[in-house]
Amino acid sequence: MNLPSSFPLVKHQKLGCGAVNERSRHLVSTMAEPTNTPMPASTPVPASTPRSSSPLQQYSIPSLTPNATTATIPLWPSTTSSPDTATRKPQRPIVLHIGDPIKYNPDTYAEFNAAFEVIRPPTPERERNELIRALKEKRWGHFSAIFRPFWGTGGEMGRWDAELIDLLPSSVKVFASAGAGFDWADTKLLGERGIIYCNSGLAAAEAVADFSVAMIISTFRHLPWCMNAATFPYLTSSSDARSTFRECHARATAASHNPRGHTLGLIGFGNIGQQIAAKMGNPAFGMKIAYYDVVRKPAAVDSELRATFYEKLEGLMKVSDCVVLCTPASADGRPIITAETFGYLRPGTRFVNIARGSLVDEEALADALDSGVVGAAALDVHMDEPSVNERLVRMATGLGFDDRGQHPGRVMLTCHNAGGTVETHVGFEELSMRNILRVVRDGGEAVTPVNLHWLREKKGV
Ligand SMILES: O=CC(=O)O
C-alpha cells in the first residue's frame, strides 16, 4: 500500500504501540512522548519511494556506512564464552548476543562484528539458572549491550526481572531486542539502571497491521463461520456437508456488513494503531477512525489519518462499531478490558486483540459474546499462550446456532501470528543492530528506545 509521502510514522515516529490505562500511564507515556530520535530531514520519505528489499528502508532508518568487509569477518560465528573474557581488556566493546545467529542481514552484521566483540552463548548458558551463574561469574566480562535479534529464540531465561537485571555489569548501556511487545523485560528497572531498552515494533508494524485488517474484516463478515461451514463437515462427518454449506450461504448475509462508514475504535495509537488506521480508513476501507491513548497524538497525525481522539476509554468504547486493542501490556500485567469495559459497548460491537492476551479478561469476553454485547471477535493473542480459552474455542468452531439464536463462527482465533513475516524478522535483526551501533559505537541516540522516561527520571532530568 502506498502511504502518503508525509505519513505520520515518519514525521512522528513513535515507539511500539500506544497506551491505555492509568495503571500503565507512567510506563506508556514514555512510549508516547516524542523522545525518539527524529529522522534526519534529508531522509527519504518511505512511502513515496519504491519498496526495497529491506523493510527498514521503508521506515527511513538511515543506512550505516559499512566499515568492514565480509571477506575477513565470519558472518555467522558461534562464538561461545571464552574463559579469559572476564579478565582481559577487550579490543572492542563486547555485545552479548542471545538467541539464533543472524540470518538476513550479513552486511550489517559484518559491520557489527567489526565494531564489537560478539559473544553468543550456546543455549544451555541462556537457561535461567546457568545464565545467573554466568552473570555472577562475570563470564562475559564487562559487556556493553545485549542483542536479541529474534523473537522465537533468546528468551530461554524467561523474564528479565530484578533477579537477572541486578546481575548485569554496570557497563551495559543498551538492550536491543526483536519484538514489538516488551513485557518480557522490566523496562522500568532497566531504565533505572541506566540501560536503554529498544524494541522492534517499527519492524513489525506493517505485518501486524495487515493481519489486523484481516481480523477486522473477519468480525464484519464472519469468516470463521464461512470457512468452517465449507470444511468441517468433511473432517468430522458429523453433519451433512451440503446442507451446512447451503445454510451458511443463505444465512451469513443477514449477519454480515461492509466496514465502510462504521467506526473503528483503536485503543493505542502508536506505529501499529496508526498503520491500521491508514489501511482501514479512507480511501481504502472507508472506516471512520477513532482512538484512545494516554497522550493525544500531534494534530498533524490526527488530521493525516482523519482520526478523532477520545480522552477516555469509556468514550471510545461507546462510539465504536469495532474495537481493536493495539497497545502494550499493562505494566502490572492486569487486564484493561474487563466486564466493566465491555459494559460500555453497544450491543453487537466487534472486538479484535492483536496486542497481548494479558490485556483482556477472556471470561468477560466470552460472557459478552454470549450475551450479544460483543457480536464477533478475533484474537491473535491469548491470556495463557500457548493454550486457548475453551469457551472461545467452542464459539470459534461450532457449526450450529446457539440457544439464543446466535450464529456459529463468531470468533476467529489465531496463534500469535500477526507480526510473523520474513520482512518483520529481517527488520528485527537490522533494527536491533542499528540501535546498538548508534548507542555503543557512535555514542548517539537509540533509534527505538522505549524506556528513556525511566532513565531521565533516574538522572533527575
Ligand atoms: O508479539 C509480537 C511482538 O511483540 O513483536
Image (tube, helix red, strand yellow):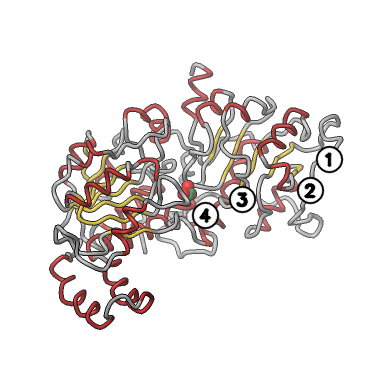
Query: Sequence order check: which comes first, mark 2 or mark 4?
Result: 4
Q: CA distance from mark 3 to mark 1?
A: 22 Å
Name of the residue lying farthest toward the bottom: 242
Label 3 environment density (alpha carbons within 10 Å; few <14, some 14–19, many ≥20):
some
Look at discs 3 and 1 and give the one toward the viewer.
Answer: 3
> Is residue 329 left or right of 176 when viewed as pictured?
left
Q: Is residue 42 visible?
A: no
Q: Which numbered marker is on residue 65?
A: none
Q: Position of residue 236 (x, y in %)?
A: 36, 74
Q: Identify the residue position indicated by label 4 in the image.
A: 56
Query: Sequence order check: which comes first, mark 1 or mark 4?
Result: 4
Query: Sequence order check: which comes first, mark 4 or mark 3?
Result: 4
Name the kind of residue labelled 2 in the image. Thr
Q: Identify the residue position indicated by label 2 in the image.
A: 79
Name the kind of residue labelled 3 in the image. Thr
Q: Identify the residue position indicated by label 3 in the image.
A: 153
Query: Sequence order check: which comes first, mark 3 or mark 1?
Result: 1
Q: Identify the residue position indicated by label 1 in the image.
A: 82
Q: CA distance from mark 1 to mark 4?
A: 34 Å
Q: CA distance from mark 4 to mark 3?
A: 21 Å
Q: Position of residue 180 (x, y in %)?
A: 47, 46
